Amino acid sequence: MAILYGYPDPRYLRLYKLGRAIHFDPQIREKFRADPESVMNQFGLTEEEKQLVKSADPVKMFKAGVSPYTIFFICWEGYGLMHRPIEEQMLYKKVSL
Amino acid sequence: MASIVGAFATSHTPQLVVQPKISEEFTRQLKIVHEALMEVGKRIRNASADTLIVFGSDHMETFWLNNYPQLLLFTGSELNGMFAGVELKLKGNPELGKDLLYGLIDKGYDASFALELELDHPYISPLYWILQGASYDSYQPRVITFHINSNVDPRIKPKRAYELGLAIRDVIDNLKHPNRVALIATGGLSHFVGTPFYGKVDEEADKFIIDKITSGRGYELSDLTPDWLDEHGEFEFRTWLTLIGAVRSSPAEILTYQKTWHCGYCVASFKV
């Protein structure tokens, strides 16, 4: 297993800003849940970044090189995965790397 | 001189405060951890600690990518934080913080400092429960937070984190302030937040660590490699290593260990 919590890939700085805003700002979080496209546009995400966010797939994001904390902010806090059944959250039982 | 009157280490997950209602067993386990954290608060109060030095690690929340510190000591007067609807307003200890900062610089630890900070879950999650246990309304210790980068590469090496703790102890032992200090490390144990391994908990690695710290051999854990820490979900153990250095590897009592579905929750009290 390689280092999991690596140097933040500079390509995704916009995505990191979006994740942090979802974490900190309840209004952004609610707006993201209601209309993710407009929030992604507000943060200037590229089409590739938009597809990653729309996938709501933590594994896909991780494999693309997104910081695990941004993934947590977007998927667990933004999409509310933290409140989903445990079986849905236990990624390691569902994926093969 | 200042004296260390308490030393504790604990997990700090967001779930400690958010408390998602996703299983009765998880709710039961969280309650046990909450009770252990409140026991830490009682012990801190019974020891008449006037200052808490809390070793934690930011997750790109308090700090941002325009300036991401390896080591950062809070040296201000007022410390605030908000997470998941929980707001903490704490008093700092600027005199002790400043002397600790200068003492560490003299010893070759080039820590940054901050007079203002907005805390997030690595501090708020455990402190919320610890301060409840200490009956915070009538007893308000001052708080100094110490960010030890365990979460965003490049991170402090485990050996360096441990040696930092040794240096902190030397500085505290020689401070002119007669403070009664309690140390708290937050983070861990095994978990894999935000990765495809989320939900895995390496109980064997947790037990390995617990065996070392309960037998007073915590110093041996400073030889762990960064790769080992990530591989076993123990990357936040760096903050514990700093505390272990500061208490010179004194033996720990485990107040609780709960292997939950996503994290090995552990609350430990070290002999001082």
Image (cartoon, rainbow, N blue to C red):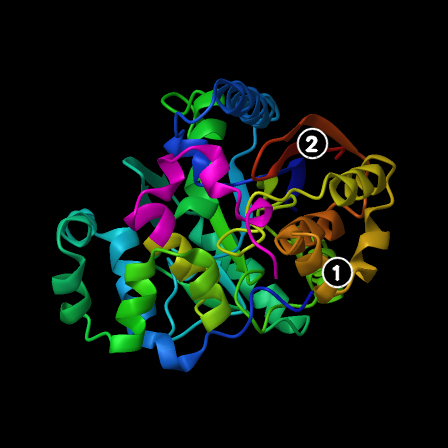
- Report the span colored magenta: A75-97
Asked whether the viewer can see residue B75, the reply is no
Q: Residues within 10 Å of mark 2 (few under 14, many from 20)?
A: many
- Say whether residue B164 is magenta: no
Comparing A40 with A97, the one in front is A97
Q: Position of residue B73 (x, y in %)?
A: 49, 60
The residue under label 2 is which amino acid type? Ser
Q: Which quarter shows the N terminus of chain A?
A: bottom right
The number of callouts visible is 2
The residue drawn where x is 48% and y is 65% is A62
Mark nearer the viewer, 2 or 1: 1
* SS for callout 1: helix
Q: Quadrant of residue B135?
A: top left
Q: Quadrant of residue A82?
A: top left
Residue at 43 percent across and 32 percent down: it is A85
Mark 1, residues whose alpha carbon is within 10 Å: few (<14), some, or many (≥20)? some
- The residue that appears at 66% across and 59% down in the rendered structure is B230
Secondary structure character of the magenta stretch overall: helix
As drawn, the residue found furthest toward the bottom would be A11
Side (left or right) of B144 relative to A31: right
The chain containing the residue under callout 1 comes to: B
Q: Residue beneath label 1, please?
A: B228
Q: CA distance from mark 2 to mark 1?
A: 25 Å
Vertical arrangement, residue B148 with respect to residue B187, above or below: below
- State the mark number for residue B269: 2
Magenta-colored stretch includes residue A90: yes
Nearer-N-terminus badge (2/1): 1
- Quarter of image, res B184: top right
Residue B125 in sight: yes
